[in-house]
Image (spheres, helix red, strand yellow):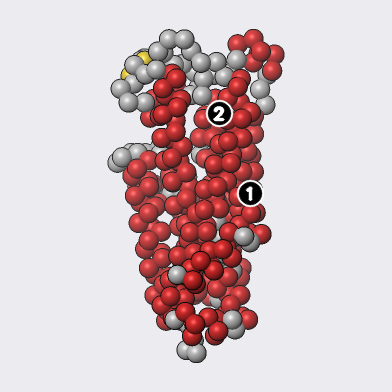
């Protein structure tokens, strides 16, 4: 337990972890850049669409900027820790103190955990920023019908809501939707982001173990992500569930929607942690 606490503290207090949080916020802002600038004269006259800040967040999560930045940001917190200890010989002091199994489990778990936490915090801070800037400018409709650009987002999480042919959402109270259904959306989106970050961090850890190279530790996840996107988009679209672009956009059928994505990512992260643990245990030189 002491080894885990030490590694986790080392990860979340590192400059790389802070950079991951800030980088996630910037990636989301870049992904919504065209929608951040609003006509203030028009806003003063009629206000922004109800739930505009939620739409911005979802737009950012679906953006190319966020999709391609996430694999890099996820490895910044703890990606090079294992290699640093191998190079410096510090592991020779840690192994007798903690034991081989404890050392390996700590490194593998903290690697994925820190990768997920960094981007998870970034999404939360970005959601808070969007809410602070745009929520006061939104107009809440008086009746139970919701229209505008955010209709699809609200409909996705509104129990009992019905979408009419003209794009209106009826059967849900606007005030209830924004405080309950959208908080459910935020919970699901942040859970997906955490698992995505943990998965990419696990891939970075895997290549660090296999090649013992800093460039592979920090860059392999991005290369794998880019390769997967290109191959699946162009040649293997029938296995779309492994396409990182698809995890938030969900253009194809997903059993359970966001919950299906969460289940897939959780399995991927756990499998990577198990594989990394076995490989690291075998490759550690005896002390």
Residue 250 horizontal/vertical position (percent): 40, 39
Residue 41 placement, left or right of 111: right
Residue 227 horizontal/vertical position (percent): 50, 56
Q: Is residue 275 above or below residue 268?
A: below
Counting residues from the start of the chain, the first of labels 2 and 1 encountered is 1
Q: Is residue 220 above or below residue 159?
A: below
Toward which corner of the image does residue 99 lie, by quadrant?
bottom left
Residue under label 1:
23
Residue 53's label in the rendered image is 2
Point 33% across, 44% down: residue: 260
Residue 173 horizontal/vertical position (percent): 39, 17
Residue 61's label in the rendered image is none
Point 54% across, 19% down: residue: 49
Residue 206 horizontal/vertical position (percent): 47, 69
Q: Is residue 36 visible?
A: yes
Please tell me how crowded label 2 is: few (under 14), some (14-19), or many (20+) other residues with Cα within 10 Å. Answer: many
Q: Quadrant of the N terminus?
A: bottom left
Toward which corner of the image does residue 12 lie, by quadrant?
bottom right
Of residues 112 and 261, the one nearer the viewer is: 112
Residue 94 placement, left or right of 155: right
Q: Is residue 56 above or below residue 271?
A: above
SS type, badge 1 = helix
Separation of residues labelled 2 and 1 (CA atoms) = 20 Å
Q: Is residue 260 above or below residue 131?
A: below
SS type, badge 2 = helix
- Tag 2 near tag 1, CB within 8 Å: no
Point 49% across, 82% down: residue: 97
Please tell me how crowded label 1 is: few (under 14), some (14-19), or many (20+) other residues with Cα within 10 Å. Answer: many
Question: Farthest front residue?
Answer: 2
Of residues 137 and 210, the one nearer the viewer is: 137
């Amino acid at each position: 337990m002491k080894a885990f606490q030490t590694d986790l503290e080392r990860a979340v207090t590192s400059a790389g972890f802070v950079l991951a949080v800030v980088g996630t916020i910037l990636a989301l802002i870049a992904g919504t850049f065209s929608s951040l600038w609003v006509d203030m004269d028009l806003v003063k006259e009629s206000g922004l669409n109800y739930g505009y800040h939620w739409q911005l967040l979802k737009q950012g999560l679906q953006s190319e900027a966020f999709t391609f930045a996430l694999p890099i940001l996820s490895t910044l917190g703890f990606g090079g820790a294992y290699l640093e200890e191998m190079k410096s010989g510090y592991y020779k002091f840690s192994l007798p103190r903690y034991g081989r199994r404890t050392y390996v489990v700590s490194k593998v778990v903290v690697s994925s955990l820190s990768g997920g936490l960094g981007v998870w915090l970034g999404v939360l801070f970005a959601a808070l920023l969007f809410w602070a800037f745009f929520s006061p400018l939104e107009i809440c409709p008086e009746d139970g019908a919701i229209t505008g650009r955010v209709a699809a987002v609200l409909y996705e999480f509104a129990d009992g809501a019905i979408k009419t042919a003209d794009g209106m959402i009826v059967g849900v109270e606007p005030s209830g939707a924004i405080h309950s259904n959208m908080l459910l959306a935020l919970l699901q989106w942040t859970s997906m982001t955490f698992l995505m970050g943990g998965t990419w961090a696990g891939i970075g850890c895997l290549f660090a173990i296999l090649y013992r190279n800093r460039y592979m530790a920090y860059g392999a996840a991005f290369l794998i992500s880019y390769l997967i996107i290109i191959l699946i988009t162009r040649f293997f679209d029938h296995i779309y569930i492994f396409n990182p672009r698809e995890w938030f956009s969900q253009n194809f059928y997903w059993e359970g929607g966001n919950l299906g994505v969460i289940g897939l990512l959780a399995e991927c992260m756990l499998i990577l942690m198990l594989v990394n643990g076995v490989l690291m245990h075998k490759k550690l030189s005896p002390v």
